[in-house]
Amino acid sequence: MASDALDREVGELLLRSKTTIAVAESCTGGLVCHRLTNLSGSSDYLERGLVTYSNRSKIEMLGVPAQVIQDHGAVSESCVRAMAVGVKALAGTDLGLAVSGIAGPTGGTPDKPVGTVHIALAWNGGVQCRQYSFSGNRGGIKEKASEAALAQIREYCRSTRHE
């Protein structure tokens, strides 16, 4: 179950620091944006959210090079890095967050089993990418991925003294 306390804390950190964010989601299907809008005043920090589920949408909307998807797949550090940078540039925000993964129950491979999720956070000074291996059913993996994404935003805000 999603943590309302985390949703609220991240929203408050973004509000207080006047930090804006744009989100590109694949496997979470809009769940991260849903959670980011749980705090009144979220329009002050959430500029936009895109569900870029297909490879085509990642390429056309976010500028992910087709070669990246061909060489590494949509569920890869290279792809989420490009997604995060792309959504940040598209929206003109302080932060860009991207999530791509395999929520299952189908779609997994020996190299990328169900539960593999990549999350990237981009800012003017760089990009942080993380890979996760979640267990559970489709809904549980989506919840865990959204939780990890919000935790990554919180960590960034805290580390840059935005509390």
Image (spheres, rainbow, N blue to C red):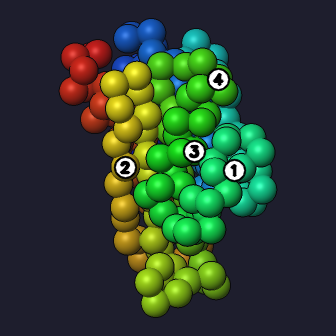
Disc 4 marks a residue whose amino acid type is: Ala
The span from disc 4 to disc 3 (Cα, nearest Å) is 12 Å
Query: Is mark 2 in CB contact (under 8 Å) with mark 3?
Result: no
Which disc is residue 83 wearing?
3
Instruction: Return the disc, 2 or 3, that comes first in the chain's sequence.
Output: 3
Query: Is mark 4 in CB contact (under 8 Å) with mark 2?
Result: no
State whether residue 148 is above or below residue 10: below
Q: Quadrant of the C terminus?
A: top left
Q: Tell me residue 27's x, y (percent).
A: 61, 60
Q: Which residue is mark 1?
A: 58
Asked whether, in this view, residue 93 is left or right of residue 52, the answer is left
Q: Residues within 10 Å of mark 3 (few under 14, many from 20)?
A: many
Q: Tell me residue 49's x, y (percent).
A: 67, 35
Asked whether, in this view, residue 92 is left or right of residue 112, the answer is right
Disc 1 marks a residue whose amino acid type is: Lys
Query: Is mark 2 in CB contact (under 8 Å) with mark 1?
Result: no
Instruction: Return the disc, 3 or 1, that comes first in the chain's sequence.
Output: 1
Query: Is mark 4 in CB contact (under 8 Å) with mark 1?
Result: no
Q: Please, what secondary structure does the residue beneath circle 4 have?
A: helix
Q: Which residue is mark 2?
A: 129
Q: Which residue is mark 4?
A: 91
State whether residue 128 is above or below residue 18: below
Residue at 62 percent of width and 60 percent of height:
67
